Amino acid sequence: MTATVREALARAANAARLAPSIHNTQPWRWVVHPDRLELFAVPDRQLREQDPDGRLMRLSCGAALHHARVALDAEGWSHDVDRPAGEPLAVIRAERHEPADPRAMQRFQLLHVRHTDRRTVSDEPVPQGVRQALVDAARQGGARLHVLHRDQVLQLAVMIEHAGAAQQGDERMSAETAQWVGGDRPAGTGLPDAVIPAELPLTTVAERDFGVTGTLTAGAGHDTAASYAVLYGDGDEPLDWLRAGEALSAVWLAATEHGATVLPLSSPVELIFTRQALRRMLSDTGYPYLVLRLGIADADHAGPPHTPRLPAEQVIEIADE
């Protein structure tokens, strides 16, 4: 029985390699024990300039945690999660095995379909029912999702413009971005040219200018039919950011299931002045974790390539005991 549990936990850790992370840094490490799976952050893959407090590192780890749980659900393993105030960030214990729920198996398949698409979206708006499904997914994942109205979208556009100008004018931030973005990324981390638009789309809310010219055709559309939302919660402690990552994963999988795309915009939460402005937009009712662009993919766009992943042996350790 122990071997079966360990094997299931190892497969869950492997599935978590598909999780999204800031600049595809994949800042996590798993340790597989006979009775539990432990999640650790890897500060060596933390963005020290853009994320000095490790908020987005923990959010990324939270997304990986949710992916691992989806994988266990798909195999019929009920499980318990402990989130200590420190390291490890989380401990998953598989409790008992039952026949897998077909719905859980379908959700697991979404892990392989989910991707980040930086191209323009179609002129088809995200249906209200889908937006509500994403709001519900965020709440179930441990956070909240506030969909912005038109005036707030215009405020967001100004915020992101200011954040982009500040970051591009910071030599250390620019140098850090250059370490993680562009080229072929043979080491298995970062954003290769193939997922970066060859030109910045002409949109109301600007996409991040990574300072490199990618090879992905951005498309001729705009973002007028897109929805923008703020993922937020009640706290700003490390555990809150871990839970935010779990909620992000839940929202992204729900969006994928409903045929919607998600583009995370992290620059507004990387700088103090824009993070405070986002909080004011939320009427100081919570702490912003991430901005999301929600849209319907352009039917003329073929799916972009997936970002690379670190080999399993670099992020998963099988304990001897």
Image (tube, rainbow, N blue to C red):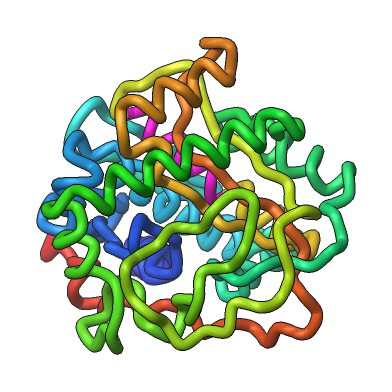
Q: Position of residue 167 (x, y in %)?
A: 27, 48
Q: Quadrant of residue 312?
A: bottom left
Please name the residue shown 79% across and 43% down the image.
Answer: 131
Q: Nearer the viewer, residue 273 or 62?
A: 273
Is 25 left or right of 108, judged from the image as shown? left
Looking at this view, name the residue that lies furthest to the top: 284
The vertical placement of 210 against 304, above or below, is: above
Is 102 left or right of 73, judged from the image as shown? right
Q: Nearer the viewer, residue 264 or 112?
A: 264
Observer able to see residue 201: yes
Please name the residue shown 37% across and 48% down the image.
Answer: 164
| Quadrant, the C terminus | bottom left
Q: Is residue 208 magenta?
A: no
Observer able to see residue 1: no
Q: Quadrant of residue 253?
A: bottom right
Q: Nearer the viewer, residue 56 or 217?
A: 217
Q: Is residue 240 magenta?
A: yes
Is 13 left or right of 261, judged from the image as shown? left
* Prevalent SS, magenta region: helix
Q: Position of residue 8 (x, y in %)?
A: 42, 66
| Quadrant, the N terminus | bottom left
Stretch of the chain drawn in magenta = 239-249
Q: Position of residue 218 (x, y in %)?
A: 59, 77
The vertical placement of 33 against 214, above or below, is: above
Please name the residue shown 42% across and 38% down the image.
Answer: 268
Is 40 left or right of 3, judged from the image as shown? left
Q: Position of residue 154 (x, y in %)?
A: 65, 36
Please name the residue shown 50% across and 76% down the image.
Answer: 199
